[in-house]
Amino acid sequence: MKSDEFTVILERIDQGDPQAAEQLLPLVYGELRQLAASKLSREFDYQTLQPTALVHEAWLRLGGDDQQPWANRAHFFAAAAESMRRILIDNARRKRAQRHGGQYQKVPVDATALDIPAHCQDDEELILLSDALDALVVHDPRKAELVKHKYFVGLSLEESADAIGISVSTAKRDWAYARAWLFREIKRMRA
């Protein structure tokens, strides 16, 4: 996607052009779908969302055809990253809810047949990460934003640095700090 074409459409949205928002989705759809696919490929095996569904839900949460004014490409993709993260967290919480049988642990058939405890991560891990990330936002918003871009959207460290507007070396330091901070926070929350 060309950055100047994106900027022109953002300016048209800002000026109230109703057709500009309709042109934005086709322009960003491929990139959003690629990010969603990348993120979901690293999700837990039981994740039921498909990349297309994640992109469509994120698009609707971003305003659909009634887009808000976006400052730039980085602002739009940061909002999309946050939207995708929230969707995954909401989905995990919904699946865990009591009324959806969330009190039961999913066990693969082969694990029960061999009478071996299943070793799988569950929605609880994703929710713990989200809660810890919310705490990191309060502690250090920039580092939390980097985690959202890298972990929840699937951007590389370099792409995340570019989206946030920091150097790659700063992103490396922030990533190391954020990982250690989140590990400590999740450990504290489990206690």
Image (cartoon, rainbow, N blue to C red):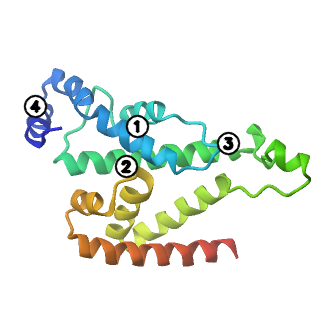
Whether residue 93 is situated above or below residue 129 in the rendered picture: above
Q: Amino acid at mark 4?
A: Arg
Q: Amino acid at mark 2?
A: Ala
Residue marked by disc 2: 81
Q: For the C terminus, which image quadrant?
A: bottom right
Viewer-proximal residue, 144 or 45?
45
Residue marked by disc 4: 12
Q: Earlier in the sequence, mark 3 or mark 1?
A: 1
Tags 4 and 3 in contact by the CB under 8 Å rule? no
Q: Amino acid at mark 1?
A: Ala
Q: How many C-alpha atoms fall within 10 Å of the one at disc 4: few (<14), some, or many (≥20)? A: some
Residue marked by disc 1: 58
Cα distance between the residues tagged 4 and 3: 40 Å
Q: Helix, strand, or loop for circle 4? A: helix
Q: How many C-alpha atoms fall within 10 Å of the one at disc 1: few (<14), some, or many (≥20)? A: many
Q: Quadrant of residue 147?
A: bottom left
Q: Helix, strand, or loop for circle 2? A: helix
Residue marked by disc 3: 95
Q: Amino acid at mark 3?
A: Lys
